[in-house]
Image: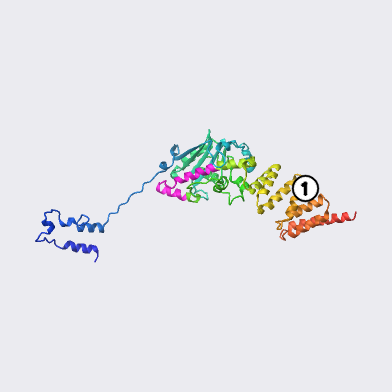
Amino acid sequence: MDLKERLKRLNSIPKITPTHPSPIEASGSEEPLARRGEGGGDLRERLNRILQPEKVYRKREILPIEKLVEGQVISTSEGETFRAEESFPSHFRYGEMTLTEILDIPAYPAHLLLRDDRLRELDFRKALFLDTETTGLSGGTGTFAFMVGLGFFQGDQFVVHQLFMRDYSEEKASLSILQEILDSYQFLVTFNGRHYDIPLLETRFILSRRSSKIREMPNFDLLYPSRKIWKGAFENCRLVTLETRLLGMEREDDVPSEWIPSLYFDYVKTGDARKIHRVFYHNRMDILTMVALAGRIHLIYHDPQAARPRKGVEHFSLGRLFWDHGNREKAITCFETALNRCDDELAWEVMKWLSMAFKRTGRNEKARSLWEEMMEWPHKRDGHPCIELAKYYEHRLKEFEKAIAFVDQALAMTPSHREREIALLLERKQRLLKKKDGNANR
């Protein structure tokens, strides 16, 4: 028998009036006995409360983005959108240089590093630093740039504007503001923007039936010079890695990039900005890191000694860049410094480049000294020093016997699958044998 059935039976029992008052009633109290029970209510009411409890829910307060991020709602002919703003003074330091020091660094390396003549006149005062936060990392027509971070120098300050779509309907308003700002600047500075941010925004402009010059703007994409200089120096060349390992900066309570799309989806669904507001910090730090990294790239190329590269691989990379750009003396200085700072894993390659730099600048004895030093290595990487010494003894000293001996060593070190190299070495040996026999017949 369940509790409800028992309660019905209890209600059906006739109420019996006692013939003799209880001691409490005899005392003159007017309160019925049933109302003095523990909890203050008769048994039936108490049982009903147990059987049908009233649940009380406290509705969670929803905090809009306007309450958590300093900014304002901007009205345009295309509707409204939210814009956050923050300014940094000229003495603000992020990384190793202040904003003023970054502006004072010559920006000519940009066109050399990216081989883009449009960047010859790069001036950071005319450049727009751009970074997006999106609903997906793969791009495509279904991916929205729900936040566009824009950094620019204005007077004696660096200003960051962040255009934020509070829902998808605000995209046209955000794009209209973005287009106005793009029209005011001559250059873009991005990090992997060439293959991600720029194509994505161009797609959003097209789908919104708006024209844009974003694809045509000269873009100093920092990813490519970063790879040229620091590939091998750190575990990767991601922006956050360079920020930490190269610039020495650490973020506090940052949002991992892979979380950002889901945080935006949750915000659009609930309207609560408690989590998404942290993305503003993430985006702002990306832009500041780009400014600091742009300064570092130009400084290390313009004046390596002032930049004080800390790793041999940085000097080695710079040396190759200088050599490719025709600055041979700077290249040799970087190779020599790299050789003093790098480990054995890299030293072989550095010695190859340095020896060839000496050879091509007429410093043959220095080159020979390096080749002979490489010959002393117990585990030679390849036959480079053997081949170069064979050439040296053939053409400069006319000592064909020694030249043939070095060719034989090179042949012994060359893997059998490198048929072209073996064929060239055999041709060299045949030529040396003929020269040797010719000398013997004189």
Front residue (pair 408, 419): 408
Against 337, is 428 above or below? Answer: below
Residue at far left of view = 19
Q: Residue at x 22, y 57 (%)?
A: 46
Residue 170 % position (x, y): 45, 42
Magenta stretch holds residue 288: yes
Q: Circle 1 sits on which residue?
A: 365
Residue at far right of view = 442
Residue 436 % position (x, y): 85, 55
Q: Residue at x 75, y 50 (%)?
A: 369
Residue 86 % position (x, y): 48, 38
> In the image, which residues are magenta?
261-289
Front residue (pair 104, 227): 104
Q: Is residue 286 left or right of residue 227?
A: left
Where disc 1 sits, the SS reads helix
Magenta stretch: dominant secondary structure: helix
Residue 240 % position (x, y): 54, 47
Residue 326 appearing in the image: no
Residue 314 appearing in the image: yes
Amino acid type of the residue that numbered disc 1 sits on in the rendered structure: Glu
